[in-house]
Amino acid sequence: MHIMEGFLPFEHAIGWSLASAPFIGWGLLALGKRIRDKPEQRMLIGVAAAFAFVLSALKLPSLSGSSSHPTGTGLGALLFGPVAMAPIGTVVLLFQALLLAHGGLTTLGANVFSMAIVGPLVASMTFRTMRGLHCSFSISVFCAAALADLFTYLTTSVQLALAFPDSVSGFSGALLKFSSIFAITQIPLAISEGLLSVVIFNALARFNPQELRDMAVLPAKRSGA
């Protein structure tokens, strides 16, 4: 998903940076308020950032000028909300660009938009919808994490198709080409990320149920239950 350094045309790189900036600013305000109100959650925020860093650094080569890997943003989105993941994901992607040459500085805005904004939004919306439909906790977490992963790559496919439309079929043909390339590797990776997220959340629910209730991930315990 990391679009490599210098791959996007200049105007596209600037456009995606401008599109991501308001979400990052909003996320910084939300994250700062959370840390002030709940300083005990700082360690868990660090765990969510480390989880995203490690999973999204496990890249597989792609023929599209990008790469394939899990994203790890679904876990943080379910714990802290999608807005908080924008600055967290930006820090993750910035360090990966500087330390691992994974992605780039000119393509940072595009990569932030797909992995740290769209992915977390899809994860949060999926989880809330499925819990509202009374789906089980594990199934809801699995679908949220897996769909966040897949929609991150769909967004990257859109970004690449906008930048490099097919000479004959235009945007739609390019989108089909880029999404087909990603689908080969991304579907099994998304399933793996969904399963890993379920394992982690089940462990958190077992050993820290009250913390998850305080974060509205688990429903509040009924009095007398």
Image (spheres, grey):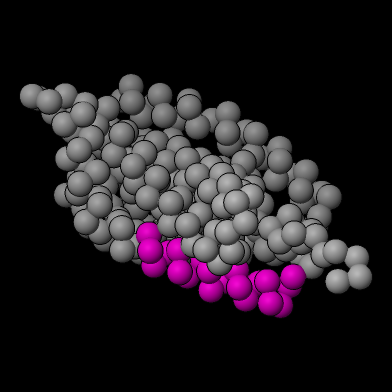
| Quarter of the image where the C terminus is located | bottom right
- The answer to whether residue 183 is magenta is no
Measured from the top left, where is residue 111 in percent x and y?
40, 41
For this orientation, the residue located farthest to the front is 133
Q: Quadrant of residue 31?
A: top right
Between 169 and 63, the one lying in front of the other is 169
Task: Give, as a single range, the part of the protein colored magenta.
Answer: 190-209
At which x and y percent is residue 64? 20, 45
Q: Is residue 51 above or below residue 167?
A: below
Q: Position of residue 216 (x, y in %)?
A: 73, 55
Dividing the picture into quadrants, the one containing residue 69 is bottom left
How many labels, in total? Answer: 0
Q: Give me the residue at 91% from left, 70% from top.
A: 224
Displayed quadrant of residue 6: top left
What residue do we see at 31% from left, 63% from top?
Answer: 188
Task: Give coordinates of residue 72: x percent, y percent.
Answer: 48, 59
Look at 57% across and 33% down and name the residue there. 23
What predominant SS class does the magenta segment belong to? helix
- Residue 152 in sight in this render: yes
Q: Nearer the viewer, residue 209 or 2?
A: 209
Residue occupying the point 24% across, 43% down: 179
Q: Residue furthest right?
A: 224
Answer with left or right where residue 35 lies relative to residue 21: right
Residue at the far left: name it: 168
Give the side of residue 37 with respect to residue 111, left or right.
Answer: right
Task: Evaluate whether residue 59 shows in this view.
Answer: no
Is residue 96 toward the left or the right of residue 197 in the image? left
